[in-house]
Image: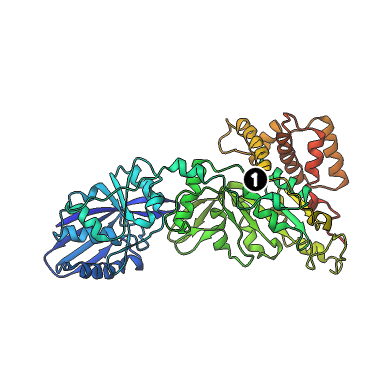
Amino acid sequence: MLVKTFAAALHSIDALTVTIEVNITRGCYLSLVGLPDAAVRESLDRIRSTFDTLGITFPQKSVTINLSPADLKKEGTAYDLPIALALMAADGVFAGDALPRYMIMGELSLDGSLRPIKGALPIAIQARAAGFEGLILPMDNAREAAVVNNLAVYGVQHISEVISHFNGSGALTPTVVDTRKEFYDRQQQIPFDFSEVKGQEKVKRALEVAAAGGHNLIMVGSPGSGKSMMAKRMPGILPPFTLSESLETTKIYSVAGKLGLNAMLLTQRPFRSPHHSISSAALVGGGTYPQPGEISLAHNGVLFLDELAEFNRSVLEVMRQPLEDRHITVSRAKMTVDYPAGFMLVAAMNPCPCGYYNHPTRPCTCPPGQVEKYLSRISGPLLDRIDIQVEITPVPFEKISDERPAESSDAIRSRVIAAREIQSRRFADHAGVHCNAQMDDKLMNRYALPDEQGLHRLRVAMERFDLSARAYGRILKVARTIADLAGSADVCADHIAEAIGYRNLDRSNWGKV
């Protein structure tokens, strides 16, 4: 007897429908085909134990199990449940007429209970797109999948519940989630607030400008000056997630298995801070069967690279293309996948090996040329993609001991949101451009050229500080953002002056002692 059930295979951050065909005929042979990996092949042992626990005899006949399309690699343990149900239906344990109306996924324990799976959200999206009546999956994944509307999602804890549903002895209850209400109720939480940061007004202003225009930023300063502390507060001043942004980022975390149990949509922009010993594959994604890397996990959020100069140079270089294109294509011998990577890069580093170059009170002990050599660990092409470069000095005692709270993240965020709304209207007719940092030369010449006084000030600065041609465009983009924060339609001299102040590392005399 031939029975079909339907499951899904993950590819990049999306899912593809997989048809599971089970045919039982006379004979004594067991075959599992359709490019299953080791975890899928081992499912037969888990299914046998489940049959024994339920008191059901495993078919003592010739059994052929096909996972279609046969040229698509099937990975993981989530095919246990649909294969087991197809075997039961084909052997006459219950009628399988209703099975094709559902997409079914789940890993079986030896006693028949269900364990959570990866990628429940993209699987639910695919189930709705393919026109299935419902999705059956482990209870721990039900809330994650239930954010997809117009699809009945059934969370189950044991395979016996599914059997009862299909033989008519007990119907499953769908999981219902008010997605919008829960999303917006949890969106206002800000775990780290700028009101806790004493002093550093110039740096906080630079972070505000970076958030308002989507600019990449690097902070250079001595140990203990507050670089990491301020970077952690960056997501709190970015505009809140839109529902579509949250859905896209949640899909990435779902595929990577980082959502946790009973999770729903992400409500806070991600903040990823990998250690400097990270490999290239872990940063951009990869592996034999590719998985999202840190730059994709930071999509629509912040990627913070602390101690930037300590990262392997070859690791940093792989970020150059994603920083421009906002996505990463990972190619392996067996497959090629494309992951989104629209993140804001925030980096921090010491100015020299000893950490005290330009410190107001402690002398730098590095030998001549060592400061410049230390900075050269960051390649010019990568530094070119960082719009804002700011130096940090330690906070004086008077500021540290001041008990008055500083300006809150909510106040800063309100100005950032207003500036982003201006940019949204400006780039409404330009597909793929959402903020000033994404402007190309044509848009920059149209929207970011300064007035005559501003152009004169920029010319003087480039000659005096020996700024490179690459700094020209970065200064204009940042100046456009500063003008948006001020509510100015034109880029003026004052905006240019502030933007020039954010190009410290471009100055020819920086780091030469």
Identify the residue at the far left of this view. Answer: 26
Residue at x 56%, y 52% (from the top left corner): 270
Residue at x 76%, y 57% (from the top left corner): 220
Mark 1 closeness class: few <14, some 14–19, many ≥20 residues within 10 Å: many
* Residue 51 picture quarter: bottom left
Q: Nearer the viewer, residue 241 or 182?
A: 182
* Kind of residue indicated by mark 1: Ile
* Residue 48 picture quarter: bottom left
Residue 507, position in %: x, y? 83, 51
Q: Which residue is mark 1?
A: 237
Residue 393, position in %: x, y? 81, 56
* Vertical position of residue 257 compared to residue 250: above or below: below
Q: Nearer the viewer, residue 88 or 4?
A: 88
Asked whether residue 385 appears in the rendered view, the answer is no
Q: Which part of the image, by quadrant, shows the N terminus?
A: bottom left
Asked whether residue 254 appears in the rendered view, the answer is yes
Coloring scheme of the render?
A: rainbow
The reply, left or right, for residue 345 in relation to residue 114 is right
